[in-house]
Image (spheres, rainbow, N blue to C red):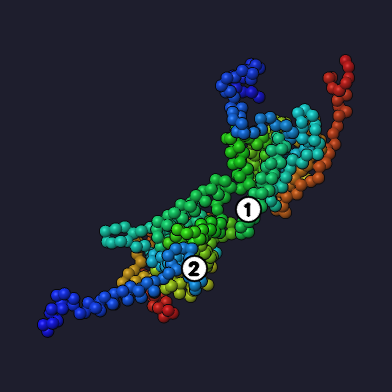
Amino acid sequence: MDRFSGNFDRFSDLFNPYDSNPTNANHAIGDFTKCTRKPLVMGSTVLGLEYQDGVMIAADTLGSWGQLARYRNESRIYPVGNFTVLGAAGDMSDFQHTKHMLDSLMIKEYYTNDDHVLSTPHIYEYLSRVLYHRRSKLDPLWNTYVVGGYNNGERFLGYVDLLGTTYQSSIVATGLGAYFAQPILRNAVEGREGILTEAEAIEILNTCMKILFYRECKTLNRIQRAKVTADGVEISEPYALPTEWSFGEGIRGFGTQTQ
Amino acid sequence: MGSFVRHTLTYPSYMKFFLVLVPCIITVLIMFRNQYDNDICTWSPQGRIHQIEYALEAVKQGSAAVGLRSKTHAILLVLKRSSGDLSSYQKKIIKIDDHIGIAIAGLTSDARVLSNFMRTQAMHSKMLYNRPLPVYRIVSAIGDKAQANTQHYGGRPYGVGLLIVGYDEKGPHLYEFAPSGNFFEYYAMSIGARSQSAKTYLEKHYELFADATLDELVRHGLHALRDTLQQDKEIDTQNCTVGVVGEDQKFETIEGDRLQRYLDLLDGGDTGQGGETVESMDTE
């Protein structure tokens, strides 16, 4: 991850008279900055789609520590207020920080007690401002977020990443899901948002998560789903997706088989 | 006679009266001078803070502003002054954001300080939350600011009153803001010089406002504003401004030729002494 040309050879850290690496900002004692240079416990894919009743998102419950499937019961979906749900990929400690931040935001919003609440687009804007601010400090929150909500009869589904890049769409996918699941979601959802039933939406998300589990080693077959409808946020308990591996028998290079 | 002349040259006898009278008058003036209005943080024994009350008086020196609202709109109407025939009229309605506007009565420069702050707050909300600032919040923010000015030695309260109209998720709103830091929400309100006359009109007709169309609302507002005029004056396209905000309507000011259409709605609008004026005089 070292992008600085002065450090391209591995001895330059030993002799670098100008300390040209800006991330080594600890020139004076007690005057150093801390930032996420290397995320540790990582979540992978979050998928989101719009359907007739609102918005649905899904994520597995794995927190990977490098290649190791370290934390297998890590919830990556979190409600913010009554009609907004947040799904997070990337560094799990930064996600925890974001949860605290949004919780206190929603509490502060209640201080005036004037019946105005932050709806999903407002929370989304705030989150994107925070992420862009942090990346501008060279201290990004190492996450990709999916924000879903349902307010006054309108669906909302948005994406924001660690650079503050945003887009809104009726389908959203993070991580490797952007490669494996996005085309499937496009075919299944786009143009049909208004007629897609809840059962169909669940089926689409289950299928996509299963494919991701087959293809990506940082996905688990244990997932959680959340829906936001006119009734509010509902987050499911984690559940396992049934998977089928017997086809591996016929594949050369699979498992421990020999020639 | 002769002795009188001699005395005049040296020490006139009537000077005795001045020598006694002048110190007495000064003593009496000092006795009756208000000892409790020198600064903002002194209470009078009657439980009043005179500087705040003087600030409230400053609002009454400004020309009148009227505000009223229906279920769909909130509007402002102001009477503008000019310092002479050669001068322009002082602007009295300030747009804060697409959904908020204010009318001022009192010190214009203080109003500019407050409106600047309000604009900053509104932009902040847009930038950070992509949300038009709820009207109550901006009014309570300047309420807090004004209150702080009534509590510190060496400071002074703002010398301006505001009417704030806005439209947010909860519909149209009208607030009055006073230099004391007080603010209240109203169906209809007037501030400034002779605003009691407008208030009388508004109190008599306010039940009609909720379901009124925009045109009707402006007509009521103009009638109320007309009641604040001096005897020989009338409202015209030059000395009046209307501010409108509502459902699917961004805040905008109507003045000059565009105002003529609304002035034509007035009863006996050409004289300024129409039926409504007579009517309200009966009720005073």
Q: What residue lies at 49% left-to-right and 68% top-to-bottom?
A: B43
User: Is residue A149 visible from the viewing direction of this image?
Assistant: no
Q: Which mark is residue B43?
A: 2
Q: CA distance from mark 2 to mark 1?
A: 36 Å
Query: Which of the chains bears the disc numbered 1?
Result: A
| Residue B21, quarter of the rendered image | bottom left
- Amino acid under label 2? Trp
Q: Nearer the viewer, residue A158 or A16?
A: A16
Q: What residue lies at 42% left-to-right and 79% top-to-bottom?
A: B284
- Alpha-carbon neighbours of circle 1 within 10 Å: few (<14), some, or many (≥20)? some
Q: What residue lies at 36% left-to-right and 70% top-to-bottom?
A: B229
Query: Looking at the picture, how far across and down is residue A93, in whole percent?
Result: 71, 38
Query: Looking at the picture, how far across and down is residue B264, in whole percent?
Result: 38, 66
Residue beneath disc 1: A109
Q: What residue lies at 29% left-to-right and 58% top-to-bottom?
A: B87
Residues behind callouts 2 and 1 on a single chain: no
| Residue A16, quarter of the rendered image | top right
Dot 1 falls on a residue whose secondary structure is helix
Query: Looking at the picture, how far across and down is residue B8, in whole percent?
Result: 15, 77
Relative to B238, is B142 on the left or the right? right
- Alpha-carbon neighbours of circle 2 within 10 Å: few (<14), some, or many (≥20)? some
Dot 2 falls on a residue whose secondary structure is loop
| Residue B26, quarter of the rendered image | bottom left
